[in-house]
Every structure is written in structure tokens, then in C-alpha cells.
Amino acid sequence: MSRPQDLPVEKDAIDRAATLLRQGDLVAFPTETVYGLGADATSDAAVAAIYAAKGRPRFNPLIVHVPTTRDARRLVRFDDRALALAKAFWPGPLTIVLPRRRGCPVSWLASAGLPSLAMRVPDHPVALALLRACGTPVVAPSANRSGRVSPTSAAHVRRDLGRRVALVLDGGSCRVGVESTVVDLTSPKPALLRPGGIAKSAIERVLGQTLRRIRPENGDGARLSPGQLASHYAPRARVRLGVRHPGPGEAFLAFGGVPAGIETPALDLSPQRNLAEAAANLFAMLRSLDRAGVTAIAVAPIPHRGLGLAINDRLERAAAPR
Ligand code: AMP
Ligand code: MG
């Protein structure tokens, strides 16, 4: 797969995208996780346009992207734990939920009215150049219609959003391929709201503390982790998990080799059973198996360790009843 660095986006394109963002338009751009649909986080109208373009429920808050930790500290209140995580993982696929500062200019629509904000500094040269050029915090959920498979290329974005997006910056394929890990630090007990591109264990090592896993379906999970919907990341075809041999009419998403004798369309997330490679391939392969005539996509078992947590989370939502 092409690395983002192989396809530099010209400075003119960045400047044009920054101008569009400042005007309140929507711009899609590459990050290391997936393509984001960006809007000026300080503009109610621009943030509302994001929810409309994605068909996203208004109760599902957005992540605010900034180019540096310093910029993040202007918007939310950091404590020592947050500083340690930012130092260890930013720029990178970690989102930290923190209390909003008084006078913070981010639209309340962005956080669905919550007194906290989810913050991230992405690790991608195009995303960082755009954030620096526009000089305003940018909300950027994945650049797809709500509930569907996330985009990991510029072509995916165009296919999903068409004319709903003013400009797409093409930075090639996304290196990580699954969304950021979301950690809540608004209470003394840190919590994992969503597994993602940084392993839970790596975060726990930095915090010197275990993360409690908040599941939206349990207890006060829905309040703490709004928008983590059971059905999400869904292709058109049904998805069946933990399958070793696909049935008739089923496409197969393998991990560590396609068994001999399979005649349905099949792709391998990682022949060498490498979880980082599997994460990077996940969404593009789901999209490519999701063809007419395929009744279901059967997926091989994926280990529940490291990045496997994020992969299994996305697959479980893709397979959830719609
Ligand atoms: P997405 O933009 O789809 O990658 O998802 C962002 C996710 O981050 C949301 O679905 C929420 O679960 C989580 N999130 C964003 N803002 C907050 C917040 N203020 N409090 C808790 N979770 C948040
Ligand atoms: Mg998304």
C-alpha cells in the first residue's frame, strides 16, 4: 500500500482546504487512522453541516483535532495523567476526553452538549499541515455516511460522500487503518471508551494504572460513551464472525492464510498474522468484498490482543443486528 509520505499534497491544496474550512465548508483529509471529514469546530453552522453530511445522530459527539498539545491545552483542562499520555502518544491515534475550559470557543454541538471535549493531535503530515494552516480547531469524524465502513482512501470518501464534501485531500492509504483509542480522563478512574490504534496495555503502562472498559450497553456506559452504537462500520452484506470455512455465497475475510479449496471471493487481512497489517487492511477489504451477489462476509477469528481489540470491536459492530 502507498505510504502517505509518497504522495505529498501540494501547499496550494492545503491553503485552499484551509480557506474552505475557515469559510465553514467541509473538507476531507487523510489522517493516520482513517480519512476525516473536517469542519471548523468553533462554528455552529459548520459543525451542524457535519452531522447533516454524515447523517450522524446529534447525540454522538465529535473529536476536536489540533496540531499541538499546546493548542489542546487552550481548550480543555489537562492534568498530569493527560500530559503524560499526550507526551507519550501525540501526535498519534489516541483521543483524550477532558473537561472543557471556561470560554472554550468550540461549538457545544461538537460535544453534543457535554461539559467535556474529546481531543486529538493526528500523526499525518497532511492533517498537521492543514490544522496549522487553518488556525482553528477542527472536528473530524470519519468521512463516511454514519454507520457504514470507514474510509481509508480518498476514493472511498468520494464514493460515500460525493458532492457533500467541498474538497478531498488525497494522501494515499491510511497507515493505521482503525480509529483512535478513546480514553476518558474526566474522573479519577481513567476509562477506555473505545479501543483503537494505540493498544490499551501501552496506555496502562504510561498511566501506571489499569483502564476500566466502558461498554455503552452496560450501566452508565451510554452516558459516558455516547455514540458508540452497537451497529456501526457495516458493509451492505451481513457479517459473520469467527468463521474458519465460509458457506455458499459468502465472501471470506481470512487472517493468516486462505484455506485451500475456497471458491468464493476471499482476501487475507494478514498472511503473516500481523495485527497492525490486519488493521490497516480491515476497512478497504470489507469494502472490496461487499459486492453484489455476496450474501454475507464471513470473517476468520482474530486474536483479542494489542490492535486485535480494536479490530474485533469494529467487526462486532459490523456484525451487530441493524
Ligand atoms: P468518531 O468521530 O466517529 O471517531 O467518534 C468519536 C467518538 O468519541 C464518539 O462516538 C464518542 O464515543 C467519543 N467522544 C467524543 N466526544 C466525547 C465526549 N465529550 N465524551 C465522551 N466520549 C466522547
Ligand atoms: Mg466513524
Image (cartoon, helix red, strand yellow):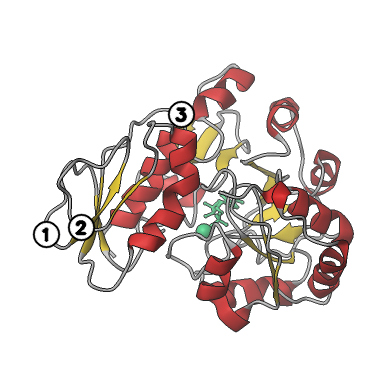
| Kind of residue sitting beneath label 2 | Thr
| Kind of residue sitting beneath label 1 | Pro
Instruction: Give residue 242's quadrant in the image.
Output: top left
Instruction: Give residue 17's quadrant in the image.
Output: bottom right
* Image mark for residue 266: none
Which mark is in front, 2 or 1?
A: 2
Above-or-below relation of 250 to 193: below
The mark that comes first in sequence, 3 or 2, is: 2
Task: Say whether marks 2 and 1 touch (CB < 8 Å).
Answer: yes
- Residue bearing mark 1: 248
Q: What residue is drawn where x is 52% and y is 64%?
A: 59
Q: Secondary structure at mark 3?
A: loop
* Image mark for residue 306: 3
Q: CA distance from mark 2 to mark 1?
A: 8 Å
- Residue bearing mark 2: 264
Q: Position of residue 238 (x, y in %)?
A: 25, 62
**Residue count near mark 2 (Cα–Cα under 10 Å), binned few <14, some 14–19, many ≥20:** some
Closer to the camera, 217 or 295?
Answer: 295
Q: What residue is drawn where x is 81% and y is 60%?
A: 105
Q: CA distance from mark 3 to mark 2?
A: 30 Å
Q: Position of residue 109 (x, y in %)?
A: 65, 67
Q: Secondary structure at mark 1?
A: loop
The mark that comes first in sequence, 2 or 1, is: 1
Instruction: Please say whether residue 307 is visible from this viewpoint.
Output: yes
Q: What residue is drawn where x is 33% and y is 65%?
A: 290
Instruction: Please say whether residue 195 is visible from this viewpoint.
Output: no
